[in-house]
Amino acid sequence: MISKVLIIGACGQIGSELTYKLRLENGVENVIASDINESNFELVNSGPFEIIDAKNYNQIKRCVEKHNIDTIYLMAALLSAKAEQHPKMAWSLNMSSLFNVLDLAKEKIINKVFWPSSIGVFGSTTPKSSTPQHTIMEPTTVYGITKQVGERWCEYYNKNYDVDVRSVRYPGIISWKTLPGGGTTDYAIEIYHKAITDKKYECYIAEDTELPMMFMDDAVNATINIMNADYASLKIRSSYNLAAISFTPKQIAESIKKHIPEFEITYNPDFRQHIAATWPKSIDDSKARQDWNWCHDYNLEDITKEMLKQLSNMYSVS
Ligand code: AKB
């Protein structure tokens, strides 16, 4: 039987593409999209949509009962850079939304939960290269704190209340359809837009700061694959390390220059550089590869080709 799915935060960067893919696989009527407003016109008009404030338990519960929802993907969150500007709001949204969904699973109103964690759980005391699954985690951002605490609660609900919650630690996600909002890694998307529109980009991250990154198609596949994995194969109920590639702003600029030789990058690091400097350069995701056969498809060259192709069409540049 195909389960009925609710995506909370469906208008956002990952939520929107996850909604489209799940609708392709499961049928439009089986995937209910929701968000706090109708900010993404294309998404809102692509199938069933409900207005839900992720902080409101009763609104989520009413929607779950109305549509016989079995599984929730909780994609609403304040990301790292925005969370630093609104710390209390980030704490309130990121934590209360998680408790609302975990509690619905604890009460057996739903069966399965996906909740995204992030490389933001790590901090400057974490080993930077090939960061292990189990390691020192002392995040210094509000976002990182919410993700780390969230991971502990996911594991707690699994062990103590038999809640089937599944999670991955997303790296920076690169995509062209829906713009991200408020992340530290957003530069790796803006740079492609500016390469097409202006042939130059001023980067707020320093040229040699290496960060883990991934193309959206890989991120969506990872999300769906971990949700389809056998219950028993998932040994980690906090959150799995997940990786594809790592690069610096200088390296992404070089890869763009292969296609747009006149492209120029300059650097003007701001507060987001301080966040990026506390995050890993690369991630050891061998547990995910072992437990549920995770593997990525896109390297930096593939991503650059696809981003420039799609954005050229979007801006109608030949
Ligand atoms: C951010 O930059 O805040 C996010 C993330 C890595 O979780 N993209």
Image (tube, rainbow, N blue to C red):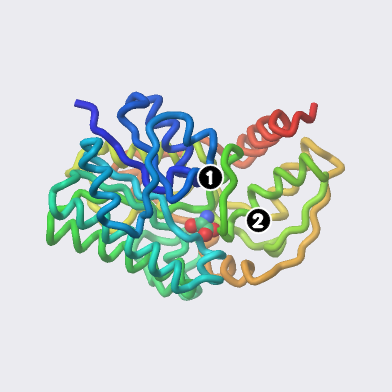
Q: Quadrant of the C terminus?
A: top right
Task: Look at 15% across and 59% down and name the residue there.
Answer: 159
Mark 1 or 2: the one toward you: 1
Task: Look at 19% across and 45% down and name the residue there.
Answer: 110
Q: Secondary structure at mark 2?
A: loop
Q: Quadrant of the N terminus?
A: top left
Closer to us: 114 or 77: 77
Q: Secondary structure at mark 1?
A: loop
Instruction: State how far apart marks 1 and 2 are (Cα).
Output: 32 Å
Is residue 279 depicted above or below 43 in this figure?
Answer: below
313 to the left or right of 148: right
197 to the left or right of 239: right
Closer to us: 265 or 104: 104
Is residue 56 depicted above or below 272 in this figure?
Answer: above
Is residue 289 depicted above or below 98 in this figure?
Answer: above
Q: On the image, which quarter does residue 192 sit in?
A: top right
Closer to us: 62 or 140: 62
Q: On the image, which quarter does residue 112 sit in?
A: top left
For badge 2, the amino acid type reads Thr
Q: Which residue is mark 1?
A: 39
Residue 91 % position (x, y): 40, 69
- Residue 230 appears in the rendering: yes
Q: Which residue is mark 2?
A: 248
Label 1 Cα crowd, 10 Å radius (few <14 / some 14-19 / many 20+)? few
For badge 1, the amino acid type reads Ser
